[in-house]
Structures are given as structure tokens and as C-alpha cells.
């Protein structure tokens, strides 16, 4: 089955190049070409894709602003003619960063990276647990044992009833690994296990005795996910 | 003078993918491989787009808004390489970097004039290439 992708770039020749590369590559299906973040977001609101080829500097919202507004995270390949965004790219956990103009070989490498990573994700989502690296070793955590996950700069902390574990990662990276049916990002610093929520009041969630903020932008999503009467 | 890069193409039978030697042939080969049809499309589009984009850049320069000027240079930067004018991409990159240090647009004059001059030399090469492609097809 072909991987569905879209290309977001305000420069027509750059879009044309990527489209041609995708056709040539054979395993990709281009679902749309978009000249700006806004039209791409409209498309993404009603359609799911596997890969997002995304320029950074565009009129209106930048590529990073588009990522901020996405409801789910496909594999992202940033395509830009600047190297200055490498740090942001890392923060957003993008799969690859291609500097324009892009050679076909480099493009293929990137797709190879994606297909490998998608295969790994499939294996992980079939499991009911996750391995996290902490204190120099990998520890198995059952999804059911995780209460919530908190972002702390370049680290994230997993909280269980028994203890907590600090790992070097970003919340975005963690979000991709967790089972989306069970876990939800409720704030830029928190992902919670929905089955562990004790109560919700105003803009806060309580899990065990911990009070966790809900961001305004995500409040309606949170309320939509709970079985409220 | 032309450099023949391939004796066979996937997009068009019985044609050779080769470019004027003044263009960066190695880079062009890395992006088009043997896809002559694609090269023809892009070169043709470049002819249509580039004058308008250069005009836009010039308007920003005349208006004196450095950040607006930088954004337009940034956008055009990779486009030059798509037609093998990689030296122009490098010059645009230097100009874009310099924009961050410039307190006013005239700090960028020398680099901008250099870019424009080089573009004036490069554009006719692309025109010639497009004519040659067309001749080859017909």
C-alpha cells in the first residue's frame, strides 16, 4: 500500500520537484499540493496522511505554526533552504530535514528512514507497554501503570503509582509513541492517561493527588474524550 | 559547449540529457538523473517565474524593507539551483545572511548588484537551453 503524503511549500518549483520525486519513488501517493499552511490545515482537518513534506518560511503561518495546530502527527519531513531551523526541527521531533535544493538520492534516503520508522511504530502500537531509557538501561513500563507524563525542558518524566522515571526526550516524541486511545496531551507540558483521571474542574485535571492544567486550546478536545453526562 | 550526461532517458526516448557547460552539470544530474522531461518542465517554468521574482525582489529593495527583501531572496535562492545556476544560489545565501546584519537596505547594495549582474548573465543561458530542448523534441 502506498504512503499518503502532501506537500506544503509556497514556491511552485519546489512543490513540482517534490511531486515528481514522489511519483518517481513509487511508494508514495501525493494527495495534495498546498501553497500555505492554512489550506494544508483545512485539508488535514478532514484527511489523514502518512507523510507531510513541509517548508518552514511561508507567507502567513510558518511550517512550525502548522505543526502546532495539527490534531495528530504524521511523519514530517522539513524542506527548507536554511539550516537555521535544525534546532527547532529537533524540538518538533521531525523525521528528517532536507535542505533545498534536494537531490533525488537524499530524498530517497529520507523516505527509507520514514518507512523504517513507520514499521517500528506499527510494532510498538501493537504492544501494551513501552520501553524507556533511564539510568543507562531500558525499563519496561506498562501503559496501564503510567498516570501521566510531564515535560521538563529536554527531559520528560513518567509518573506511575510506585515511582517516576526521567528520560531524555520531548513530549512530542513521547506523544507519538503512546497509544492515542489511552493517552492524551492536555497541556504543552502534560500527557495524561485518560483512564486515571479522578476529576476535572475548570481548567484542571486531578490524577491521584496531582493537579494538572488543561490548556484552553485543548479543553474542548479533553471534554470530547470523556464520557460525560 | 555541452556535457552529455546520459545516453538514455526515462521520460523521453531517443534523447540525451545534457546541459550547457556553464551550468552546474553535476548538480543537475543529481536532481534530474535521466529525467529529461522533468528538466524541460522546470527550465521552462524558471523562464516564466524568475523575471517576476527578481522584479519582486527589486521592489522590496527599492522600498527599503530589509526583512521583506530577505524573505524574497530566501524564496528565490534554491530556484536558481533547479536550473544549474548554483553559483547564484550561493550568492543569494550570502546576501540573505548579510540581511540579518544590515541596518539599512543600502548596506546590501554591492551584494545585490552582484546577484543581479550574475542573474543577467545566467538567464540567457537558460533561454538557450529551453530553445534547444524544444528543438530536440520537435
Image (cartoon, rainbow, N blue to C red):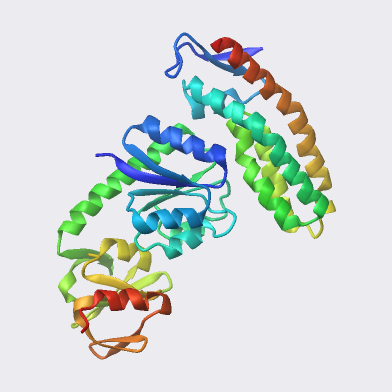
Give me the residue at 54% from left, 41% from top.
A100
Quarter of the image for residue B100 reads: bottom right
Task: Let me know if residue B107 appears in the view.
Answer: no
Q: Nearer the viewer, residue B94 or B82?
A: B82
The answer to whether residue A113 is above or below residue A202 is above
Quarter of the image for residue A182 reads: bottom left
Give me the residue at 64% from left, 47% from top.
B74
Can you say which quadrant of the picture contains the N terminus of chain B?
top right
Pinpoint residue A9: horizontal percent, then vertical percent: 52, 47
* Left or right placement of residue A15 versus residue A202 in this view: right
- Which residue, as the protein is rendered here, is positioned at the far front? A229
* Left or right placement of residue B89 versus residue A166 in this view: right
Pinpoint residue A226: horizontal percent, then vertical percent: 23, 78
The answer to whether residue A94 is above or below residue A156 is above
Give me the residue at 83% from left, 44% from top.
B110
The answer to whether residue B69 is above or below residue A21 is below
* Left or right placement of residue A56 versus residue A227 in this view: right
Task: Let me know if residue B93 appears in the view.
Answer: yes
Quarter of the image for residue B65 reads: bottom right
Pinpoint residue A123: horizontal percent, then vertical percent: 18, 53
Give me the residue at 60% from left, 39% from top.
B78
Pinpoint residue B5: horizontal percent, then vertical percent: 52, 16
Query: Exactly how many numbered labels are in the figure?
Result: 0
Can you say which quadrant of the picture contains the C terminus of chain B?
top right
Amino acid at each position: 500500500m502506498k504512503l499518503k503524503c502532501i506537500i506544503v511549500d509556497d514556491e511552485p518549483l519546489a512543490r513540482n520537484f517534490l511531486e515528481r520525486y514522489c511519483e518517481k519513488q513509487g511508494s508514495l501517493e501525493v494527495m495534495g499540493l498546498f501553497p500555505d499552511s492554512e489550506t494544508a490545515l483545512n485539508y488535514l482537518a478532514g484527511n489523514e496522511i502518512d507523510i507531510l513534506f513541509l517548508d518552514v518560511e511561508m507567507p502567513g503561518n510558518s511550517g512550525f505554526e502548522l505543526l502546532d495546530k495539527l490534531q495528530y502527527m504524521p511523519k514530517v519531513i522539513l524542506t527548507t533552504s536554511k539550516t537555521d531551523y535544525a534546532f527547532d526541527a529537533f524540538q518538533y521531533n521531525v523525521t528528517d530535514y532536507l535542505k533545498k535544493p534536494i537531490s533525488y538520492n537524499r530524498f530517497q534516503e529520507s523516505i527509507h528512514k520514514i518507512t523504517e520508522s513507520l514499521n517500528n511504530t506499527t510494532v510498538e502500537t501493537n504492544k501494551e507497554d513501552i520501553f524507556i531509557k533511564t539510568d543507562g538501561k531500558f525499563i519496561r513500563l506498562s501503559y496501564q501503570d503510567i498516570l501521566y507524563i510531564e515535560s521538563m525542558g529536554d527531559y520528560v518524566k513518567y509518573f506511575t503509582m510506585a515511582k517516576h522515571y526521567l528520560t531524555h526526550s520531548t513530549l512530542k516524541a513521547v506523544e507519538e509513541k503512546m497509544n492515542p486511545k489511552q493517552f492524551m496531551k492536555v497541556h504543552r507540558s502534560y500527557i495524561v492517561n485518560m483512564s486515571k483521571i479522578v476529576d476535572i474542574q475548570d481548567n484542571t485535571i486531578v490524577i491521584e493527588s496531582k493537579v494538572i492544567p488543561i490548556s484552553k486550546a485543548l479543553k474542548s478536545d479533553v471534554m470530547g474524550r470523556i464520557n460525560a453526562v | 559547449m555541452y556535457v552529455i550526461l546520459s545516453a538514455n532517458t526515462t521520460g523521453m526516448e531517443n534523447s540525451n540529457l545534457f546541459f550547457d557547460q556553464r551550468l552546474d552539470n553535476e548538480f543537475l544530474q543529481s536532481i534530474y538523473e535521466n529525467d529529461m522531461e522533468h528538466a524541460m518542465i522546470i527550465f521552462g517554468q524558471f523562464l516564466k517565474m524568475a523575471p517576476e521574482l527578481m522584479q519582486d525582489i527589486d521592489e522590496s529593495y527599492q522600498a527599503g524593507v530589509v526583512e521583506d527583501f530577505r524573505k524574497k531572496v530566501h524564496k528565490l535562492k534554491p530556484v536558481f539551483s533547479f536550473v544549474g545556476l548554483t553559483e547564484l544560489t550561493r550568492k543569494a545565501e550570502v546576501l540573505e545572511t548579510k540581511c540579518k546584519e544590515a541596518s539599512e537596505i543600502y548596506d546590501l547594495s554591492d551584494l545585490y548588484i552582484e546577484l543581479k549582474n550574475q542573474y543577467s548573465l545566467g538567464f540567457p543561458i537558460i533561454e538557450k537551453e529551453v530553445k534547444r530542448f524544444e528543438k530536440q523534441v520537435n
